[in-house]
Amino acid sequence: MKAMILAAGRGERMRPLTDDCPKPLLKVRGRPLIVWHILNLVRAGITEIVINHAWMGETIERELGDGGKYGARIVYSPETVALETAGGIANALHLLGEEPFLVLSADIYCPYFDFAQVADVLVDDDMWGNPYPPDKRDACWIYLTPNPFHNPEGDFGLTMYQVANHGEPKWNFSNIGVYRPEMFKAIAPGTHARLGTLIRQYADLGRVGGEIYQGDWVNVGTVAQLEELNAPLGARKAQA
């Protein structure tokens, strides 16, 4: 399985830190956010990685290189202007192949997520070995988390591994998921499109599976969040 790390965002809320450093290279516990992902992917046996970039993309490429120093093989999908999440994936589809692939955002911190579990979440056959029709099988499988402070209402309902746009309680989309390429083939390269909108369309068709991830997960969106993650352990507990 290949993986794509979304790294094209400008990181406006992280300014002034992101004025001269791309957000994926900001460090948590002495290691750039994106490198946490690369090392965890390689540990799980996922070594072919696509990274898109826009803001200060040359800095990302210079820092990460071809991925060899991490045991990975990295290729890049440059964007002149950030194309949003689904647009970035569609623009890189020629690099991702015809099999399901993993996508995650560079600016989340989830150091203990086990990416080995994603390899077989999308299945082509039912429990009796009968093939699903292509328009009935899950188009993607997403991971949800308990709702963080910045998204108290959540995004999706979940019943028996079926993701829906309705239902209670709602859970937060973690920005980690496995997708079939077919989801993005109607999006022309260079088009701006959001992944959340696309997932909702497929959820209405009953074609989105998912599960809850209860481990450490932070969407690092502000300087204060970054500082808290980098605070000594005792100080972080005191702030909780």
Image (cartoon, rainbow, N blue to C red):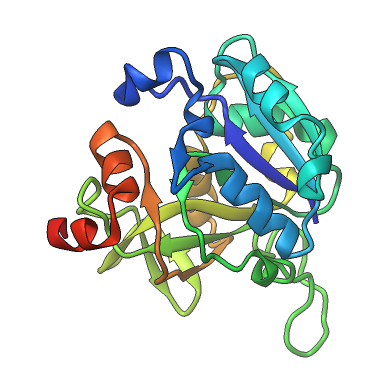
**Can residue 188 be seen at all in this image of the molecule?**
no
**Residue nearer the viewer, 85 or 66:** 66
Q: Give the residue at the far top of this rendering.
A: 80
Q: Identify the image quadrant of residue 73.
A: top right
Q: Identify the image quadrant of residue 127.
A: bottom right
Question: Where residue 116 appears, x then y in whole percent?
Answer: 69, 69
**Residue nearer the viewer, 68 or 4:** 68
**Residue nearer the viewer, 213 or 205:** 213
Q: How many marks?
A: 0
Question: Where residue 213 appears, x then y in whole percent?
Answer: 45, 69
Would residue 189 appear left or right of 12 to someone viewing this image?
right
**Can residue 114 be seen at all in this image of the molecule?**
yes
Q: Give the residue at the far bottom of this rendering.
A: 128
**Residue nearer the viewer, 85 or 157:** 85
**Residue 55 sits above or below residue 45 on the image:** above
**Residue 193 sits above or below residue 181 on the image:** above
Determine the residue positioned at 33% across, 40% down: 226
Determine the residue positioned at 49% across, 20% down: 21
Determine the residue positioned at 71% across, 24% down: 61
Would residue 227 appear left or right of 90 to someone viewing this image?
left
**Residue 79 sits above or below residue 88 on the image:** above
Q: Identify the image quadrant of residue 125.
A: bottom right
Q: Quadrant of the N terminus?
A: bottom right
Q: Quadrant of the C terminus?
A: bottom left
Determine the residue positioned at 60% across, 68% down: 114
Would residue 32 appear left or right of 16 to someone viewing this image?
right
Question: Where residue 92 appears, x then y in whole percent?
Answer: 74, 30
Q: Give the residue at the far left of this rendering.
A: 238
Question: Where residue 69 appears, x then y in whole percent?
Answer: 79, 42
